[in-house]
């Protein structure tokens, strides 16, 4: 994020690209909506009560562990990053275990080896994908999840996450939310008639000395037409976790922070994503800052949310 400049911005919601344009003194053409569930006429208390306790059921995301271990090896052997990265896809996807890197792990010093061995997952996750149109909401069969990003980005590789249990997504509150997401996209893109919506239930852990990374890749796009970077359900003993909306200013490619807000339970951040500069006129990116325990004496902190990748398919 060092390449992203900050503008003095008023932190408030609800807010859209129109108000953000006034704050930054130029027109932001691509859509942004930060609001509460109740701002959309939804039963916010009911939604939060329905989903508040489900996150402990999720499985750990070990893709994060493998990525962090690669970073440790690249730091230890900066002249050998090419071969390390050539081996990484099979390790990242679980087709090979860490022994694939034994030629390098055997050369780590004690401090480096301890770091490598002590990497633990910090994010639990499950997924569910739906096709939504004006008349129906249909869940799609499980499949690998990949993102439409540059092939050099490891997020382009097809990952397999645990499927969200039916109870998490077939309740009336979640179904009403999916209908609201459809309406929100149709508001900013009236020609849209059918969406594919992938929901990512995530629980992110922070402990003393080990912050919880919400966006380990830094400022980024997700390869979708639109995203809801987070609908926050729980914030438990945490500070940080600030959602940042960033404009990539063309043609120079400079990135400028145009809005930031630490979402609270019941709040969400919607924005256009990849290729939005061609569809709407402004190239928007996003980032979320790490979380840390607000009171280390109370132990771990948790930020629990549902993120959404949204693509127009008709």
Image (tube, rainbow, N blue to C red):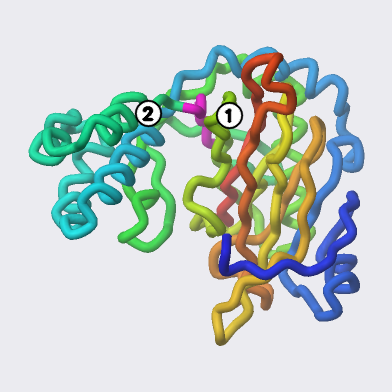
Side (left or right) of 270 relative to 113:
right
Instruction: Name, please, the residue furthest toward the left.
Output: 103
In this rendering, which labeled residue sits more in front, label 2 or label 1?
2
**Screen quadrant of the C terminus:** bottom right
- Name the residue: 70% across, 55% down: 244
First along the sequence among labels 2 and 1: 2
Give the magenta range.
122-129
Instruction: Residue 119: give its label.
Output: 2
Mark 2 burial class by Cα count in 10 Å: few <14, some 14-19, many 20+: some
Instruction: Residue 215: give its label.
Output: none
Q: Where is residue 29 shown, x and y percent of the image? A: 75, 74
Mark 1 burial class by Cα count in 10 Å: few <14, some 14-19, many 20+: many
Instruction: Residue 204: give its label.
Output: 1
Side (left or right) of 44 relative to 156:
right
Q: Quadrant of residue 69?
A: top left
CA gap, disc 2 to disc 1?
Answer: 15 Å
Q: Where is residue 57 shown, x and y percent of the image? A: 55, 13
Side (left or right) of 39 relative to 146:
right
Q: Where is residue 105 shown, x and y percent of the image? A: 16, 35
Kindly report the secondary structure that dominates the magenta region of the rendered protein. Answer: strand
Whether 127 is among the magenta residues is: yes
- Name the residue: 37% across, 34% down: 63
Above-or-below relation of 279 to 235: below
Above-or-below relation of 229 to 143: below
- Name the residue: 37% across, 28% down: 119
Q: Are marks 2 and 1 in contact (CB under 8 Å)?
A: no
């Amino acid at each position: 994020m060092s390449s992203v400049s900050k503008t003095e911005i008023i932190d408030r919601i609800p807010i859209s690209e129109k108000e953000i344009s006034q704050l930054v003194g130029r027109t932001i053409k691509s859509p942004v909506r930060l609001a509460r569930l109740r701002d959309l006429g939804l039963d916010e208390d009911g939604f939060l009560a329905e989903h508040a306790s489900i996150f402990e059921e999720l499985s750990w995301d070990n893709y994060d562990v493998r990525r962090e271990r690669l970073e440790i090896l690249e730091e230890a052997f900066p002249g050998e990053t090419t071969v390390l990265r050539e081996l990484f896809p099979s390790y990242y996807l679980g087709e090979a275990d860490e022994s694939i890197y034994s030629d390098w792990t055997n050369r780590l010093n004690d401090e480096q080896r301890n770091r490598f061995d002590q990497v633990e997952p910090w994010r639990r996750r499950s997924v569910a994908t739906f096709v939504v149109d004006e008349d129906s909401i249909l869940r799609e069969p499980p499949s690998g999840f990949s993102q439409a990003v540059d092939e050099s980005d490891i997020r382009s590789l097809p990952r397999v996450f645990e499927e969200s249990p039916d109870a998490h997504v077939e309740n009336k509150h979640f179904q009403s939310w999916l209908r609201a997401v459809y309406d929100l996209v149709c508001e900013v893109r009236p020609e849209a008639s059918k969406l594919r919506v992938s929901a990512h239930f995530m629980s992110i852990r922070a402990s003393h000395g080990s912050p919880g990374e919400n966006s380990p890749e830094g400022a980024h796009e997700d390869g979708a037409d639109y995203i809801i970077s987070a609908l926050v359900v729980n914030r438990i003993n945490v500070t940080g976790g600030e959602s940042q909306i960033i404009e990539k200013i063309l043609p120079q490619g400079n990135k400028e922070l145009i809005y930031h807000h630490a979402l609270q339970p019941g709040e969400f951040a919607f924005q256009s994503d990849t290729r939005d500069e061609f569809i709407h006129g402004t190239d928007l990116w996003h980032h979320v800052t790490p979380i840390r325990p607000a009171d280390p004496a109370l132990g771990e902190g948790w930020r629990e949310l549902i993120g959404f990748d949204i693509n127009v398919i008709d």
